[in-house]
Image (cartoon, helix red, strand yellow):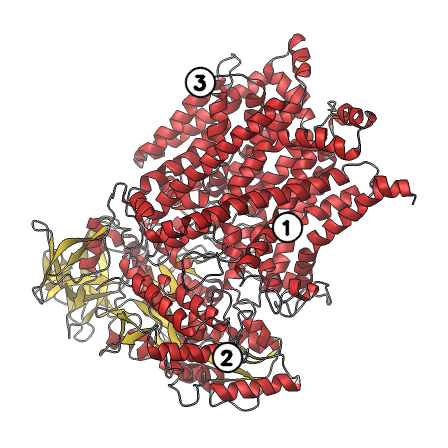
Amino acid sequence: MTVRWWREVGWRHVAALLAVAFAVVPVLYVVSAAFNPLGTVVSTSVVPTEFSLVHFRALFDDPSRPFLRWSLNTVLVCVAVTGVQIFCSALSAYAFSRFRFRGRRGGQLSLLLIQMFPQFLAAVALFTMFTAMGEAIPALGLNTIAGYSLVLMGGALAQVWLLKGYFDTVPRELDEAAIMDGAGHGTVFVRIILPLARPILAVTGLLAFVGTLGEFLLASIFLTDTQRKTLAVGLYGIIESDRSNNLGVFAAGALMTALPVVLLFLFLQRYIVGGLTAGSVKS
Amino acid sequence: MIAVLIRVLCLGTAVGTAAALTPSLVSGRHYAVLAVAWVIVAVLVGTYATRRPLVAKYLVPGTILLVLFTVTPVLATLQLSTTNYGDGTRTTKQETITQVLATSVVETPDSPTFHLAVATTGNPVAGPFTFFLVDPATAEAFSGTEEGLVRLEPDQVTVAGGFVTAAPGYTFLTPKQVNDAAPHLREFAVPTEGGAIRSRGLREAFEGRAVLRYDEATDTIVNTDTGVRYTVQRQGDREYFVDGGGTRLTDQSWRAGVGLDNYRKVFTDPRILGSFLGIFAWTVVFAAGSVALTLALGLVLAVTLNDPRVRGQKLYRSVLLLPYAIPGFISILVWSGFFNQDFGLINGLTGLHVNWLGDPFAAKAALLLLNLWLGFPYMFLVTTGALQAIPADVREAATIDGAGRLTAFRRITFPLVLVAIAPILVAGFAFNFNNYNVVELLTHGGPFTPDNPNAGATDILISYTVRLAFGAGGAQFGFASAIATLLFVITGVLAAAQFRATRSLEEVH
Amino acid sequence: MKPIQRRCALVAAVTLLAVAACSDGQPASPAPTGAAPAASGAPARQNADLVIWTSEVASRAVQPIAEDFGRQNGITVAVQVISADLAANAITANTAGNGPDVLMLPNDFLGGALQNGAIAPLPLRAEDLTAYESGALASVTRNGQVWALPYGMENLVLYRNTKAAPKAPATVEELVSTGQAAVKKGTVERALSLPVGQDGDAYHMEPFFTSAGGSLFAIDADGQYDPQQVGVGTAESIAAASKIAALGEGGSKVLTRSVDGTNAIAQFTDGKAAYLVSGPWALADIRKSGVPYDITPVPPFAGGEPASPFLAAQAFWLMSKARNPAFAQEFITKTMNTPEAMTAMYTQDPRPPVRTDVLASVSAKDPDMAKLAAGAKNSTPLPDFPFMSGVWPPLGQAYAAIVGGADPASTMQKTASTIESVVPAK
């Protein structure tokens, strides 16, 4: 542990550990609530003192809270919405980054602005819209996972900005060289830009996934059937009915909800942290 | 070659889906949905059936979804903002009158409750229907249609268990069919001297009469018992049926267009204007502060950990992500417990006795602290991604130049990252500007003073205006939509200004 | 070409998923009737023959009864838990023709529901309902029509930790002194747990407020609230507010804004509070906790008026645009309107039944029910005016400010004018 190590590397650990403490204390509290058999606000401390799986059992054994079913619905919604979001956003970001066309600036600006409309204030309009939609096509109406996913897909271009910002940093010489070799714009996009943009694709994928996972305002309006709920709205129902003593069950549910995000992140890490040096196409 | 094949397959699927949906949409008269479906197909075919290098090929998929599920609701909200739609005005005038008349049916005193069997000579869905009734006291059977009531001789029908179970020429409805015929049976009444016999539930009928009658010619409702006439009168932004003294027959009004009244209300209501400036200022501080704080912490951590010599990077990154992995509303509820003055974790760990959520200044700090915790992992992720985009040779060049680490960061890394994430910062500002969830779940906009029970110390524009729109007057969707529209405009103007500022940033490099 | 294939495989996978999600549990043709809903996954809204919307706690109680009803009639039944804002969502959905057939909510739903034409009167006469407690029945009766079938009573009572306070207090003063003595002895950490919170809680403060002489609205000759006469700013109410202030953070500290809805019951179930003011919803948690307890009515101030909490009745409502009105009517007026069904409701969700015969029979086995019901002796009905959404928050905030040490007189006067401004003219 030389002075130089501290100056170059050591301080980084200190800073990171401070941030970890800040990040982890509330999470620890949730963990300790989930494993504390009493599971009340008053009896829970930051450091887990007892260990019992009673709240997890309560989650899985109660037919009025089909937790597995909720998880499955959540995965369906998250995967569909994330996939569509990244697909559409990447395409549009490529267009904004590489093409020069009329209305490009105006299009970007209006896109940015339209995304700022507070969507839950349009909930009444959405509800009316999907009521009509459900009468025409029952599979896409209210109280269907597909219909709810469609509503969230209204934000299909939410990730355009990050992607475009990243695409802009990819040197144009690469495109031009490929076009010299006779590649079309589609090939450039698929063979050059996308492989190089892996880190940001992974980041935006994670952002889209988490954003979808935590949505409960619209879900509580759209999904009424117990069998069709997502984790967020199901858990929200548990708190709503809770009068301060459901903390344990609720914390257990929260942990189970956070788990897929952490797993997804672990899986995506190698893409996120690779940088341009590892950017050559490996397929 | 494969690309062409895929294109053909995808377009074929789109056309096929639309074609498959068409018959049921036509038979159900859902012409709007039908038109939308085929317009989408036309756009897709028009875009992808050519080989020309069109920009549209990249913009169409996202734009279609955006137009359908974001732009359309926004336009519908605009339309809604010109109506008085809300609590008390959810129905049309016709529906209101029908409901008021229907609920004025009173049961004839001393009349029997009949055992009912519903039968038809036609089909069980549309009728025509006949009521077969048994008076349980006398065991007499009757048949009733809209023509009137007919007493039956015992040999005309089969009676079992107090109910008519069969009659020649009639099909008797099952309970499920009775239920499904409800729209017709609601209107169905057998006229009698004392009023009319109506069905109740599945197996009962009773005699009653509607006390109220609507007279279309004069647009009045008359109480046939008292003779009181109720005429339409406008009160505030809606109309009611009122008697001569101005007392309402019912609080139920009906939906009507009110033009720009909702907007006028925003600009003339002293309650709104009185608090607007202070709340607007705090909203800007809150949004800008949240973005600045999360960016600062996120970026510092990203730079700190962006060094291959740091061991355990993966672990650090995963742990730092945790606040982001737990759904927001759960963390906020947990945090609101932490801020409790007597039992909260924060005062407990620090030995302070701050009334976090009861003191206006402390509540603002609490809100920013919570938003920092919720948001820094996001910025950490985003800036980590942006750092990856800085070519290694640039970074090496900076350090070889002999520039100090801080200087290199300030002059090279930071501007490059900022350019890459400028739109994210603008979007983050806009998001927090309207971050209803965090304010509502942590402080409800409070703490409040009795001087102004509508505007709390931590209220941002959206939480404040939502309270006005859904508070004392019940849910006022028309008014709320007008507010949403105005908020949208305010946010848009601010964002556009920021966008211009970041443009100048881009031109530097 | 490889990357292209991979990309499109991804798109195809997403599309397939979306399709799978669409077809998931959605039979293309109407579901055969009589299918057990529990077995096939709950049916879609449009295919269920009876749809009930409720909260999580109540859903456990009604589910078995509803399933039984479905079996008897050979129909599908769906009991759906609505997570957020049940009343508002039900009214909105009902307007769109997408709402439930039956809704379970307390009686203060009546005003707003009538204003929106969201409910239909029950085909029942008052004389059909003689078995029901008259006050609760009155609270769902309007214009000579019965609008809901009440099943469970809700009113505040005083829960007492008998280890900390063996004897029931006769007055608030006695409650405070015995509670504080128990704190001194170290048996508990708090004398009283009554939720105040930073936003205040007008519902929980009502018994103290009324006993000290305060009133929200004047009561007219018919025993109805007269909202034109707001009582909050009167001299009596200000005096009552001063008594509350004396119990607050600037006085004996029995009341504090730190105790709120999220921790009030837990304080008691963890054995940290000698007394708790709460309703029947706390009972299950208290029993589970093992804290030795007793239930008595909320006591009055010495020499004061009786403490009168609000009385709410949980009830079954028939929606005006129910798709299955016949089954809904049958379910409420025939199936639920029986001692057996009401007893079953109590078994799953213990609160005093509104049916007097059932209350008597369950109280014989479960004395707590009689004790909870006794707490309603001096109660007044929970007001159901649609404008109450503009009354509860300012009144609550006033209590929070007063408990926090604000001046009672000016606070109550300002609040009174706020409340007067939201009450519509006659």
The residue identified by callout 3 is B46
Where's residue B213, x and y in %? 11, 58
Residue A139, image quadrant: top left
For the C terminus of chain B, the quadrant is top right
The residue identified by callout 1 is B373
Residue A7 in sight in this render: yes
For the N terminus of chain B, the quadrant is top right
Q: Residues within 10 Å of mark 1 (few under 14, many from 20)?
A: many
Where's residue B439, x and y in %? 51, 53
Kindly state the secondary structure of the residue where label 3 is placed. helix
Q: Which badge, 3 or 1, comes first in the chain's sequence?
A: 3
Which of pointers 3 and 1 indicates the residue nearer the eye?
A: 1
Residue closest to the eye, C87 or B287: B287
Where's residue B114, x and y in %? 20, 68
**Chain ID at mark 2:** C
Q: Amino acid at mark 2?
A: Leu
**Chain ID at mark 3:** B
In this rendering, the answer to whether C120 lies above or below B433 is: below
- Answer left or right for C23 relative to C315: right
CA distance for labels 3 and 2: 75 Å
Kindly identify the residue that appears in the image at 51 percent across and 65 percent down. C198
CA distance for labels 2 and 1: 37 Å
**Chain ID at mark 1:** B
Which of pointers 3 and 2 indicates the residue nearer the eye?
A: 2
The residue identified by callout 2 is C247
Q: Amino acid at mark 3?
A: Gly
Q: Amino acid at mark 1?
A: Trp
